[in-house]
Amino acid sequence: MKLHFSLAQIQEQAGIMSTDTPYVSSISIRNFAVALESRCRPSILNKRLTPEEAIPLSVEDNNTRVKEKLRALVREAAAERVRIYSRRDDFELTEMPADRREGSVLGNWMSLILMGGDAARMTLKLHFAYQDIKNIAYPIYGGKKPADISDAQATDFVKELCNVIAGYLVQIFEDNDLSLGLSLPLCTRGLYEVFSDYSATSGPLIRFSDHWVLQAEGIRLPGTVLFEVMDAGKLEKLLDYELGQRGASDDDDDEGFDFL
């Protein structure tokens, strides 16, 4: 079946007036025709369609929604897991300073973990200084003051934070019938951040990043995430997931915090 049309006919069917120039310029005429063809029935061309009925979301629109959802999921996972496992409710997730340059060193050390599946890959890094982590971890290790915690214990603590954040994300993916595996968390010098590449691409591999800071009184824990999406269509399952749907009761409490 072929549809023959003019721009004026399409405007009329979509309920778009000629004065709506910005809207007209933003839609794909071809997508509109495909939408009509796929839904064609005897009365379709005699019905005045709303823009929502007639014009499907473009691939770019869906990709944007998937990217925003992935960023939000990782932020939720990081904030919730850090509050729970640090036993501190005062941690807040804030934006990275706007004047930060790509490749800037964000901490003396960094812990990272890799996640990957059929549809996407993610690399999460937590950047830290030992003193900040010791201020968080000493009561969990049974110490009386931060100085009671060794550098090795502080390293293990951040590695396990990466692990529980990634595990939270894996569970969300599994709840939506999406596969996602994860590596063991690693730790290395923060200086190596200068070699990081967060450049964005739009296809065929969709590559983008997110940067934020978890802060509490006297403590700063920057986080960076690199996303690589191979199949955005599969990830559309996540769009209906409501943030906050999973809570502390869905996972082991801090007594089950296993240091690696």
Image: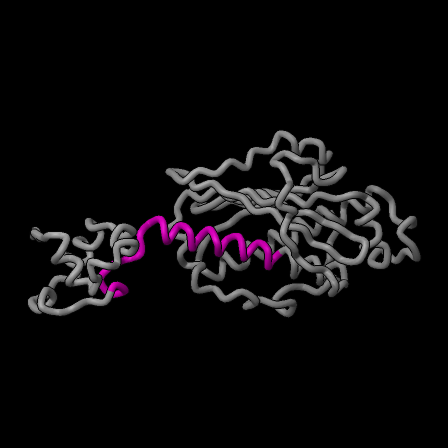
Q: Is residue 61 magenta?
A: yes
Q: Which quarter of the picture shows residue 142?
A: bottom right
Q: Residue at x 55, y 58 (%)?
A: 171
Residue sitting at the far front:
19
- Residue appearing at x 91%, y 48% in the figure: 147
User: Does residue 181 show up?
Assistant: yes
Q: Residue at x 66, y 49 (%)?
A: 162
Res 184 seen here: no
x 28%, y 56%: residue: 23
Q: Quadrant of residue 152?
A: top right
* In front of the other: 68 or 111: 68
Q: Is residue 77 toward the left or the right of residue 10 in the image?
A: right
The answer to whether residue 107 is left or right of residue 225 is right
Residue that lies at the very extreme toward the top in this rendered image: 195
Mainly helix, strand or loop, the magenta region? Answer: helix
Q: Is residue 137 above or below residue 48?
A: above
- Residue 207 lies left or right of residue 92; in this view the side is left
Question: How many labels sit on residues?
Answer: 0
* In the foreground, 10 or 242: 10
Residue 140 image offset from top left, x and y in percent? 82, 58
Q: How is the image coloured?
A: one colour
**Relative to residue 208, is residue 245 depicted above or below?**
below
Is 99 covered by the magenta stretch? no
What is the span of residues highlighted in magenta in the rendered image?
51-77
Residue 159, compared with residue 53, is above or below; it is above
User: Which one is nearer the viewer's eye here, 145 or 174?
Assistant: 145
Residue 229 at x, y percent in the picture: 44, 44
* Position in image of residue 178 (x %, y %): 45, 54
